[in-house]
Image (spheres, rainbow, N blue to C red):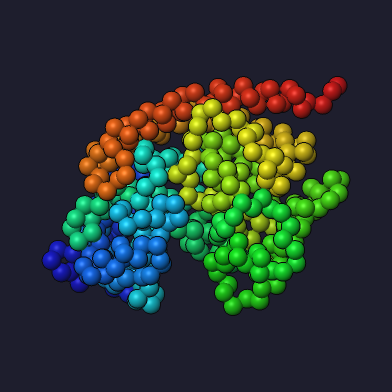
Amino acid sequence: MALLGLTLLTAGASTAHAQTDAELFDPSVLHDLRLWINTRDLAALREQAATNTYYPADLGWRGIRVRSVGIRSRGNGSRNATKLGLRVDFNRYVSGQQFLGLRSVVLDNLWQDPSMVREHVAMALFAHLGQPSSRQSFARLFINDEYQGVYSLVEPVDARYLTRTLGDQAGYLFEYRWLQPYYFEDLGDDLTAYVQLFEAENHPNDPLALAYGPIRAMVRAINEPSDTRWKAEADRYVDLQQFVTVAAIEAFMAEWDGLIGYAGLNNFYLYRRAGSDRHVFIPWDRDHAFHDLRTSVFERVGENLLLRRALLDPELRRHFQAELERCARTAEREGWLEAAVQRTSSLVRAAAWQDPRKPYSGADHDAAVAALMEFARSRPLQVLTEVAGDAAATRSPR
């Protein structure tokens, strides 16, 4: 059905005009995305930006109009009423409704990053290095035909994401919720302590023991008192190689609010395949990546109990060093990291300068991009030098 040049997407439909979610998340395109919402609902949405209250709206993209989606405010430090961060649920009010096969999408307001490209580049690097990573693209967002600024369209971590990245969606998915600094200390046997930290994203009717028992066992293994037994015990519940790889990528990127964040663990999902007790880590929300060129790759690694004990194992420490070196070689090879920053920032610069709701100036945007370019040029050699020094210091005597 068409109305005023727009194709209406009906409940349960997943594609239109042969367009796909790959086109929506095409990183080389600056999309135009439109939301139409009742003016009173929009005022309420801004007034209640601190809550997760949903409001009905229509979404438009490339001539497709999706009716009766649900939108709500989202974000932690980035949540505000001026430039709304939004979650769009296509099936909130229409059961089974999808858009390009998606049940939801995140509209990141890029509030905390003057460059507007940190998370985009960080997730591209994770993907380039073979780790699960949300696809992202950029859009100029219009609400009731008024320009709201540049947004990042972010693929949610859900069943479709898990199938695409891990080839499995039947397991247990948890989003980590930051409540206070936490470093994998043992919280005891009461499973509700883990329910508060790890929010279940699926299997809502399963008993707590089935969903959270393996997480409790994982934390107990991380705190195993015997150094000789630690690796074998921990590896039953954590893919240690994968965890160390993600930690190394974050260390290379000087990420200050992730697995080894300034205030403990933050910004990740935990996934456990069906029939398994072993967990993998999925990075999320990396707009603080590339924080400071001067940051040591070993900064705060002793605070996280899992990483600290992993790096006491010679094999896992060598893996950490090798992954850091792989990051640096990848970044410097043909200028990959510098080219990614340049390509992405060029795509959004004009729209970023015109963004009427950003909390920084156009000059601030350009300065942040310049700092990222310097990071991309200088970080690889700095990391290679530091890794070489650590390898020499930890090398077993002949």
Front-most of residues 147 and 272: 147
Q: Is residue 358 visible?
A: yes
Note whether 351 is above or below 190 in the view shown. above
Residue 233's x, y, as percent?
80, 53
Residue 300's x, y, as percent?
64, 38
Front-most of residues 187 and 199: 187
Residue 396's x, y, as percent?
82, 26
Left or right side of 114 for 147: left
Note whether 320 is above or below 60 in the view shown. above
Front-most of residues 6 and 346: 346
Note whether 140 is above or below 386 in the view shown. below
Left or right side of 339 for 175: right
Where is residue 338, by image quadrant? top left
Note whether 397 is above or below 65 in the view shown. above
Left or right side of 136 for 386: right
Residue 350's x, y, as percent?
24, 38
Image point 71% across, 47% down: which residue?
A: 305
Image point 77% across, 55% down: which residue?
A: 221
Image point 18% across, 64% down: which residue?
A: 6
Front-most of residues 29 and 123: 123
Q: Quadrant of the C terminus?
A: top right
How many numbered marks are there?
A: 0
Image point 60% across, 61% down: which residue?
A: 197
Q: Quadrant of the N terminus?
A: bottom left
Q: Is residue 90 visible?
A: no
